[in-house]
Amino acid sequence: MSANRDALVPKPLLLVAIHGSLDHYASGPKEILEYGRHFSIHIICSNSRAPAYDWPPGITVERVGLHLPYGRRPPWVSAAGWLDYLVFLKTLDNRIARLKPSVVYSYDSPAFVAASLIRRYRDFRLVYHCYDQWEPQRQSRFSLRRQLDLRAFREGPRASLVIYPEPARADYYMQRSGDRRPPTILPNYPKLDLVPPIEDFDALIERRFARRELLYTGSIDSTVALPETVAALAGMRGRLRIFGSAKVEPRRQLEELAERLALTDRVSFCNWLPHHEMIAASMDATIGLSLHKPVSLNLTEMVSASNKLWEYAARGIPAVVPDTPNFRSKLSGEEWVAFADLNDPESIARAVRWFLDDRDRYVRASRAARLAFEQRYNFERVAPSVIEQLLLLAHPASSSRKFVSGGGPAGTPGPAQA
């Protein structure tokens, strides 16, 4: 009888706001679909990028504002960004007034600031989930994003809940905002069903070892050590396959470098694919590469936020990662990881050879990667306590009620061990 009664109780409404596109966040759909088990979901996002994810019928998605080009923009487009933001703000205000959500869940600083302004005259609980922590000092003084990031620091202490994917970024937020509450840490780990149990995994490992293919998935720009990796490839057997969106100039430079080194038949580019297609198309890769150089806060403090790294683990693919304190602090002693100086092609080559010069070591590393994903680095382990907090915000009178079972300590408030 109790179960039937609970089934008749409508789910609380979670209004999700992002002044971007959740379709292009690997972690966004995963999190929202999980939240949708406990909440009704209404998403308001910008219209800057074409839809790239098939949201289920029960989730409402509104794409609002101007269709502005993504990435670096000419001055006139940047000016239009202010108008676009006002349209977003007005739409968000209208939907909050009409829908009366239990919780507003903002996925970036522009959405959080917009919701904070509305909250001055409307009552709702507000979550600030900051994926990427932009640094105002690195932005143009007159840019809209800089003003919104600065305002987000001022408004942060008044948020009902603050979430970051990486503890060091959360520390930066606390220093800049003066918020004494340690944010909740929700790492960007994949769900277990991203790569279900792999049939005949041992045979796949053998095929991968024979294939000797390096895999990079992600953006292609000057912060990524792809030129150094191409140079490293010149002294090894094997090939390099690149999945991701590329800016014109970095890709042209990579193609020219591969041509100079006579590697054009060993370096291949695959354009952007929907996430599940990219995972399926890269299952036979030998070694995964995490190649972002530590040139900013996001790229220096990114190990828990690097969804690509954990997706390599989900596929049971050993990985080469930056030899930085952030990556060392979490991954030292992991059998499936090798560290490299991303400015040194020979260091990258040594890390790759560490796996490929010893078949038994490669087999152990592959199994260790998959096991690490199954036991520690998955979304199901860290999500329940975050969902618990969201439900307590939606039902403040039920603070003693246990809504969600399971989950480890990584999602609990404070500088949790993720």
Image (cartoon, rainbow, N blue to C red):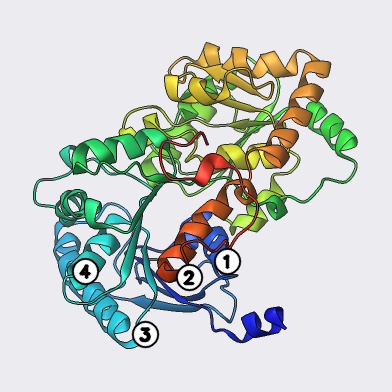
Amino acid bearing label 1: Leu
How far apart marks 3 and 1 lie (CA) works out to 20 Å
- Circle 4 is placed at which residue position? 85
Q: Is residue 247 left or right of residue 93?
A: right
Q: Is residue 231 above or below residue 403?
A: above
Q: Nearer the viewer, mark 1 or mark 2?
A: 1
How far apart marks 1 and 2 lie (CA) works out to 17 Å
Q: Is residue 197 above or below residue 302?
A: below
Q: Position of residue 127 (x, y in %)?
A: 35, 60
Residue located 57% across and 66% down the image: 33
Mark 1 vs 2, N-terminal side: 1
Q: Nearer the viewer, mark 3 or mark 1?
A: 3
Q: Nearer the viewer, mark 4 or mark 3?
A: 3
Count neighbours of disc 1 (C-alpha within 10 A) and say few if under 14, some if 14 to 19, many if 20 or more. Answer: some
Do tag 4 and tag 3 residues touch (Cβ < 8 Å)? no
Q: How many marks?
A: 4
SS of the residue under disc 3: helix
Residue located 83% across and 17% down the image: 360
- Circle 2 is placed at which residue position? 51
Do tag 1 and tag 2 residues touch (Cβ < 8 Å)? no
How far apart marks 2 and 4 lie (CA) works out to 19 Å
Amino acid bearing label 4: Tyr
Count neighbours of disc 3 (C-alpha within 10 A) and say few if under 14, some if 14 to 19, many if 20 or more. Answer: few
Amino acid bearing label 2: Pro
Count neighbours of disc 4 (C-alpha within 10 A) and say few if under 14, some if 14 to 19, many if 20 or more. Answer: many
How far apart marks 2 and 3 lie (CA) works out to 24 Å
Q: Is residue 221 left or right of residue 408?
A: left
